[in-house]
Amino acid sequence: MFSEGFFSISFEGLLGLAVTIVSVYFIVKQLRETKLATQMEGLLSVAEQLNEIADLRESLLEVVEQADWHILSNQEAHARVYQSETRKIAYKKTKNFYELVAVLVKGKSLDRNLASKYFGNSVAIWWRRLEKVTLHESDELNYNVAESWEWLALELEKMSG
């Protein structure tokens, strides 16, 4: 024993404490690595969805890159996208995809830095392109159909800017 009294501790006790601290360190390290691996698996799954809608989004680009797109009202923009079944499906899949990514980031199931690194500015770019359509849809339904997507677009713009 090192000393007598309330705080006396044996060498074996100190050794046991040191082993426990080192063990906890390695457990925490492993948990962090496992969490990152799980997030990467989830990110790859989400990325597969993004690849599935890439071709569909070409039809959206045809509309949102038209010269008069920026002067259209929300309702006119919505009508233009919904004129074509392909564009309508592309819009809905794009909206749902980015909303899912945003919900995962908001819920801390997907790290914000990882989302930023992987998706870059695409979240904000597509938000700006489809904001009018989404706002019209939100007005029609009386709730924000892409609240998380809008939030993530703003957050990632702050991080990059």
Image (spheres, rainbow, N blue to C red):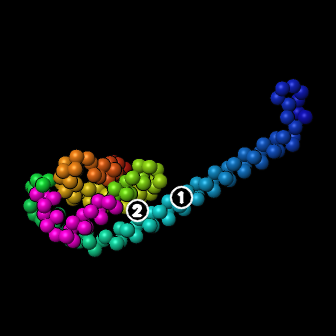
Q: Confirm whether residue 154 shows in the render.
A: no
Label 1 neighbour load within 10 Å: few <14, some 14-19, many 20+:
some
Residue drawn at the location 42% of the way across and 52% of the way down: 105
Q: How would you rate the neighbour count of disc 2 (Cα within 10 Å): few for under 14, some for 14-19, many for 20 or more? A: few
Kindly indicate the quadrant of the structure image that contains residue 58. Answer: bottom left
Horizontal side of residue 131 vs 21, given as left or right: left
Which amino acid type corresponds to the residue marked 1 in the rendered image? Leu
Where 100 sits versus 6, above or below?
below
Q: Is residue 59 above or below residue 70?
A: below
Q: Would you say the residues marked 2 and 1 are in contact, meaning their CB atoms lie under 8 Å apart?
A: no
Q: Is 94 in the magenta?
A: yes
Q: Which residue is mark 1?
A: 36
- The answer to whether 65 appears left or right of 96 in the picture is left
Task: State the residue in front, 143 or 34.
Answer: 143
Q: Secondary structure at mark 2?
A: helix
Q: Label 2 amino acid?
A: Tyr
Q: Which residue is disc 2 drawn over?
A: 118
**Which stretch appears magenta?**
76-97
Along the horizontal axis of the image, is 97 left or right of 109?
Answer: left
Q: Residue furthest top?
A: 5
Marker disc for residue 8: none
- The spot of residue 51 in percent (x, y) is 35, 71
At a point 32% along the width and 53% down the height, the residue shown is 149
What residue appears at the point 46 percent right and 55 percent down from the top-left corner?
Answer: 110
Q: Tell me the quarter of the picture where residue 52 sits.
A: bottom left
Earlier sequence position, callout 2 versus callout 1: 1
Q: Kindly report the distance in space between the C-alpha atoms of the residues bearing marks 2 and 1.
A: 14 Å
**Quarter of the picture holding the N terminus:** top right
Q: Secondary structure at mark 1?
A: helix
Q: Is residue 102 a member of the stretch shown in magenta?
A: no
